[in-house]
Image (cartoon, grey):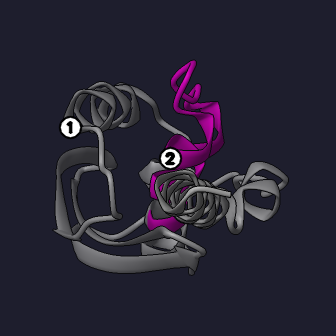
Amino acid sequence: MPRIVKSLLIFFCLIVIVVGSFLGYLMIGQKTVRSETIEAIDFRFIEDGTYRGHYHQGRWQNTIEVTLIDGEVIDITVIEDMRFADLVLQTVLFERVKQASNLNEVDVISGGTVSSIAYLKALEDALKP
């Protein structure tokens, strides 16, 4: 077999390994996150203040601060964001949280279900009694 063909074959195999590894990394923990449920946390029964919560599962790791005043979510700040974060998804989801009165009323974003759940679990961690 000519040397160029061997070199191209080795190069192709390396590309397949790198791409496969990257795709595997992207999927680690996805099934676990997708199966998570969001607890019913009624914002009206939480004292005014700023709370910090964290969620970690595979690449879906984030830390969030949420501020409540008079039973309403006023502000949500991402302290540590997940890899490959989608800022549009984050903005839309956080606006839905601000409009809700209970955390488990918030609908996840279509096409970003796993990321939505990861953010909501961090909020749940912050607001759990």
Q: Residue at x 37, y 32 (%)?
A: 93
Toward the viewer: 55 or 53? Answer: 55
Q: Residue at x 42, y 75 (%)?
A: 126
- Residue with the mark numbered 2: 115
Q: Amino acid at mark 2?
A: Ser
Toward the viewer: 32 or 12? Answer: 12
Query: Image quadrant for the N terminus?
Result: bottom right
121 to the left or right of 1: left
- Verify CB contact (< 8 Å) between mark 1 and mark 2: no
Q: Give the numbered dot on residue 40.
A: none
Does 34 sit above or below residue 91?
Answer: below
Q: Residue at x 61, y 35 (%)?
A: 113
Q: CA distance from mark 1 to mark 2?
A: 11 Å
Residue 37 rendering spot, x and y as whole percentages: 78, 53
Residue 91 rendering spot, x and y as whole percentages: 22, 32
Q: Which residues are magenta?
A: 103-122
Residue 5 rendering spot, x and y as whole percentages: 56, 51
Toward the viewer: 47 or 33? Answer: 33
- Residue with the mark numbered 1: 87
Q: Choose top left, top right, bottom left or bottom right for residue 66.
A: bottom left
SS assignment at label 2: helix
Furthest residue in direction front, as rendered: 2
Q: Is residue 107 magenta?
A: yes
Residue 23 rendering spot, x and y as whole percentages: 60, 54
Q: Amino acid at mark 1?
A: Leu
